[in-house]
Amino acid sequence: MKRRAPVQYTIRGIPPEVDHLLRQKAAKKKQSLNQVILDELAAATIGSPRRADFSDLIGQWTPDPGFDEIVAAQRQIDPDKWK
């Protein structure tokens, strides 16, 4: 199937509360209003966003020495198993 160029829409009559919530979501995600609207349209029509968005995870890592120890132990090579 031949890929078509993106289509542009002009949408009128957006209720103020919808506009406000979309703009809030765009600010929270640090995305353009256009991108948020595209993601919302995709989710409403095809059931999933066009792409994965992990922006809500950025800066959320908390150091865990116990986890680091476990990972380090798993990365050890057992010389007897490589004979």
Image: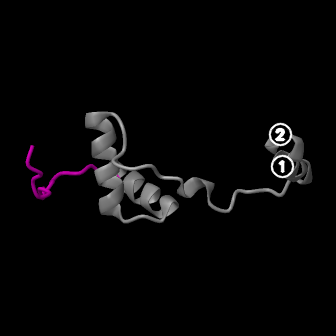
Label 1 sits on residue? 77
Locate residue 78, reporting x and y percent.
87, 45
Which of the pair 65/71 is nearer the observer? 71
* Residue 74 against residue 55 in the figure, above or below: above
Identify the image quadrant of residue 31: bottom left
Cβ–Cβ below 8 Å for labels 2 and 1? yes
Amino acid type shown at disc 2: Lys
Assign the magenta stretch its main secondary structure. Answer: loop
The mark lying in front, picked from 2 and 1, is: 2
Numbered circle sitting on residue 81: 2
Which range of residues does the magenta coloring cover? Answer: 1-16
Mark 1, secondary structure of its residue: loop
Q: Residue at x 27, y 44 (%)?
A: 41
Q: In terms of depth relative to the viewer, which is nearer, 24 or 72?
A: 72
Image check: 21 left or right of 8? Answer: right
At x 36%, y 38%, the residue is 48
